[in-house]
Amino acid sequence: MNARDAVVVNTLGGALQHYTRGLVDALGQAGGRVSVEHVDEPSVAGGSGLGWLRRYVRALWSARRTARRSGAVVVVTWPVLGHLDRLLVRVVLGRRTDMALVVHDPRPLVHARGYGPVARRLGSLASRVRLVVHSDTADAALRADCPGVEPELLPHPVLPRRSAPRPRMPGRPVVRVLGQYKPDRDLAVLTGIGERLGDSHRLEVIGRRWPSVPGWDVTDEFVSEERLDELMATADVVLVPYARFFQSGIAIRSLESGTPAVGPAGSSIADLYPDDRYLAGDSVDSWCDAIVAATSADRGETLELAARADRTCRAAWAAWLGTHSAAVS
């Protein structure tokens, strides 16, 4: 059986640039050609949401032409219109195109259109659009909200660093929270950590729209891709302080840099490490214990965990692409 080609339509050309590189590498493991259609979001390209939608539709038409020539699978990285994307992708790509939509947050962490009951019912009309998720929690939420849907659970793409990890800097360990503020960020936990560890650790929050947090040095600014990598590599711990989330690209990228990520128990972060030492429970003490454990982590071992996750990811996506090939042969 010949290797299957794929077209990736990255609907968040800025925010999912790193994710898309990992996805392309994983899909390419199967031996086929992988091309990318980038669609920049308004925060990158400027303009309105309507302009973003127009660019998305043009990218889908381009992907359709490629898929018709080569029989490629089309993979959309993020739903622009929530469940309505299922119908849009189905209509534009047509009956003869094999297609999949990655659903990162079945219940969005920020306000988003297209996730209500009407949108879900309309989306169910496009039954041939495969839905991909990256965590058990996302799988469970999507099944609960959309009866009859059977998501395909695949690993989040990983791009481990090929260079040696940076040595730890002397002085107080650096704990960083990175990324924009969202309502599901746990400010109470952060405040408690500030009270407990503020004197012994450098506690920093860097991202857009963050309020002040007692005990933390908060910088309200956009973080570029290049600076994000630098901030992760120079931290001792990257904290993912959510009360609720489905998977964390920040935690993945932190692992890739050799810096351990600490987050809540029961989250997808548990899939990245061999034990629960970096997982926190409901108490502030458990978060502090996980942070202290992470500050003593061996960066080389953390990078090896990233390499192992990468191998697992590549194998899973290659097998998935092979299943698509068998289904349409």
Image (cartoon, grey):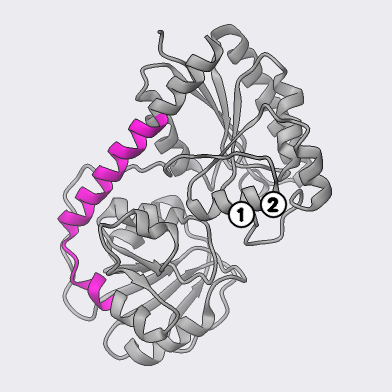
Measuring 25% from the left and 70% from the top, which residue is drawn there? 294
Q: Main secondary structure of the magenta part?
A: helix
Q: Position of residue 55 (x, y in %)?
A: 70, 33
**Around disc 1, counting alpha carbons within 10 Å, would you say few (fewer than 14), some (14 to 19), or many (20 or more)?**
some
Q: Amino acid at mark 2?
A: Asp
Q: Position of residue 311 (x, y in %)?
A: 28, 37
Which residue is under mark 1? Answer: 141
Is residue 267 left or right of 59 when viewed as pictured?
Answer: left
Vertical placement of residue 268 versus 280, above or below? above
Q: Amino acid at mark 1?
A: Ala
Measuring 60% from the left and 39% from the top, which residue is drawn there? 150
Q: Is residue 216 magenta?
A: no
Dots 2, 1 in contact, CB < 8 A = yes
The quarter holding residue 86 reads top right
Label 2 SS: helix
**Around disc 2, counting alpha carbons within 10 Å, would you say few (fewer than 14), some (14 to 19), or many (20 or more)?**
some
Judging depth in this view, the residue of 120 and 233 nearest the camera is 120
Is residue 3 left or right of 82 when viewed as pictured?
Answer: left
Q: Is residue 48 visible?
A: no
Measuring 51% from the left and 84% from the top, which residue is drawn there? 188
Mark number, residue 151:
none
Give the Cα distance between marks 2 and 1: 6 Å
Label 1 SS: helix
- Residue lying at the far right of the rendered structure: 118
Which residue is under mark 2? Answer: 145
Segment tinted magenta in the rendering: 291-317
Judging depth in this view, the residue of 206 and 257 nearest the camera is 257
